[in-house]
Amino acid sequence: EVQLLESGGGLVQPGGSLRLSCAASRFTFSSYAMTWVRQAPGKGLEWVSGISGGGGSSYYADSVKGRFTISRDNSKNTLFLQMNSLRAEDTAVYYCAKQANWGWPDYFDNWGQGTLVTVSS
Amino acid sequence: EIVLTQSPGTLPLSPGERATLSCRASQSVSSSYLAWYQQKPGQAPRLLIYGASSRATGIPDRFSGSGSGTDFTLTISRLEPEDFAVYYCQQYGSSPITFGQGTRLEIK
């Protein structure tokens, strides 16, 4: 069974930075595109960023472009999201999700349990 | 960007009844690249349907998806107590990926 375990969330001040990680196991990590989806408290799902299986292509929502950077380390089966210049509206649970296929875009067949990011002074 | 509008926002039904959830796109979804997810409180979303009508692994056959172009439907034939949750549609036919705002299925 696919496992995705996020970490790195927490409380950060506006303008600050945070780096999220997602440790993946029980599947061939490098064969699949990966993505981050967030959910603000009491709100719906918002796609944030995605990256191809090899890491050569990355994609961002307009709301985070220029502030967030997605990356992956296929040797360590880990996905990352570097978040800079954080704003109050970035407060959310951040989910790591595995895409069903190599290509982009695609649907998400496995999700982690999420990590909460709170941006507040 | 394709905007997905789900209706109704809340759907009160009783166990054993049939549920019909709608997802309408602002423009045609390429190749019926539409998925449905279920989310229960405090849990991550779970994939139910992809390609508009294909059930994901392990999903009971009371869940079915249909539609094409701009109009899609998720149907739950006979509601079980564990089906009361929030349901989201997602299009992946074009970038950026977008989700609908969700339909809350609640016990009447």
Image (cartoon, grey):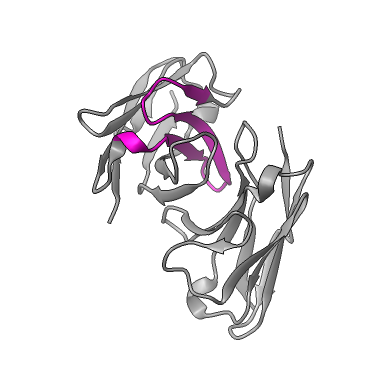
The magenta region covers: A30-59
Vertical placement of A73 versus A29: above or below?
above
Residue A121 percent location from the top left of the image = 43, 23
The image quadrant where one finds the C terminus of chain B is: bottom right
The image quadrant where one finds the N terminus of chain B is: top right
Q: Residue at x 46, y 15 (%)?
A: A85
State yes or no: residue A117 in magenta: no
In the displayed structure image, the side of residue B21 where residue B27 appears, left or right: right
In the displayed structure image, the side of residue A88 where residue B78 appears, left or right: right
Q: Nearer the viewer, residue A101 or A36?
A: A101
Quarter location, residue B2: top right
Q: Residue at x 43, y 37 (%)?
A: A102
Q: Nearer the viewer, residue A91 or A49?
A: A49
Residue A17 percent location from the top left of the image = 38, 18
Vertical placement of B53 versus B34: above or below?
below
Q: Count how many numbered circles sit on residues in the image.
A: 0
Q: Nearer the viewer, residue B88 or A109?
A: A109
